[in-house]
Image (cartoon, rainbow, N blue to C red):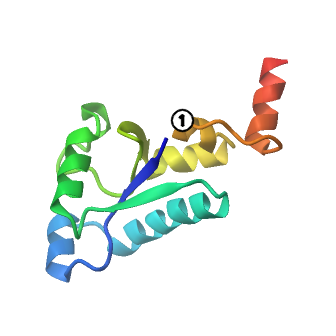
Amino acid sequence: MVIRVYIASSSGSTATMSFLLPRICLYTIKKKQQDVLGFLEANKIGFEEKDIAANEENRKWMRENVPENNRPATGYPLPPQIFNESQYRGDYDAFFEARENNAVYAFLGLTAPPGSKEAEAQAKQQA
C-alpha cells in the first residue's frame, strides 16, 4: 500500500500556480503540505509526492478521484489531497483531525505500529 500525497510545488511558474490556486494563500497551502509530508517522514510512513503543478496527469487524476462529497462547492479540490493507492483518504483538515485524535494510521488505512499511541488506544478499545 502506497500513500500518495498530491501537492502543488513551487517549481511551477507563478502564473501556473495562480491559475491552479486562485484567491488562496499559497503560503497556507505550502504550510499544510509541509505539515503532512513532515509528519509522514518523521513517523517513517512511506509515501509518494504527486505534483499537480508540474504534471498535468497528476492534476487530472487528483481532480477526478476526489469524491464529489469532498469537493468544494466551486473550483477544484486544493492540495494536499491524500490517497492510499487509489482510495481517497482525505484532505488536510481530515488529516489534521486524525492527527489530533491519534488516529493517523487508521485515517491512512494502515495498521498502527506496536507501541504507538494509536495502537495502545486501539488495544484499550478492544479490551
Q: Vertically, is 19 above or below 114?
A: below
Dividing the picture into quadrants, the one containing residue 67 is top left
Dividing the picture into quadrants, the one containing residue 120 is top right
**Quadrant where the image shows the C terminus:** top right
How many numbered dots are placed on residues in this image?
Answer: 1
47 lies left or right of 78: right
Type of amino acid at the residue the image marks with label 1: Gly
Measured as percent of width and height from the top left, residue 17 is found at 21, 73
Measured as percent of width and height from the top left, residue 63 is found at 21, 47
The single residue placed furthest to the front in the displayed view is 1
Residue 127 or residue 115, whichever sits in front: 115
Residue behind mark 1 = 109
18 lies left or right of 105: left
Residue drawn 62% across and 41% down?
105
Q: Vertically, is 115 above or below 8?
A: above
Q: Vertically, is 26 above or below 124?
A: below
Measured as percent of width and height from the top left, residue 124 is found at 83, 26
Residue drawn 57% across and 66% down?
38
Residue 33 or residue 49, whichever sits in front: 49
| Other-residue count near label 1 (Cα within 10 Å), few / some / many at <14 / 14–19 / ≥20 | some
83 lies left or right of 12: right
Residue drawn 59% across and 38% down?
110
Measured as percent of width and height from the top left, residue 2 is found at 47, 46
Q: Vertically, is 23 above or below 6?
A: below
Residue drawn 27% across and 50% down?
77
38 lies left or right of 121: left
- Label 1's element? loop
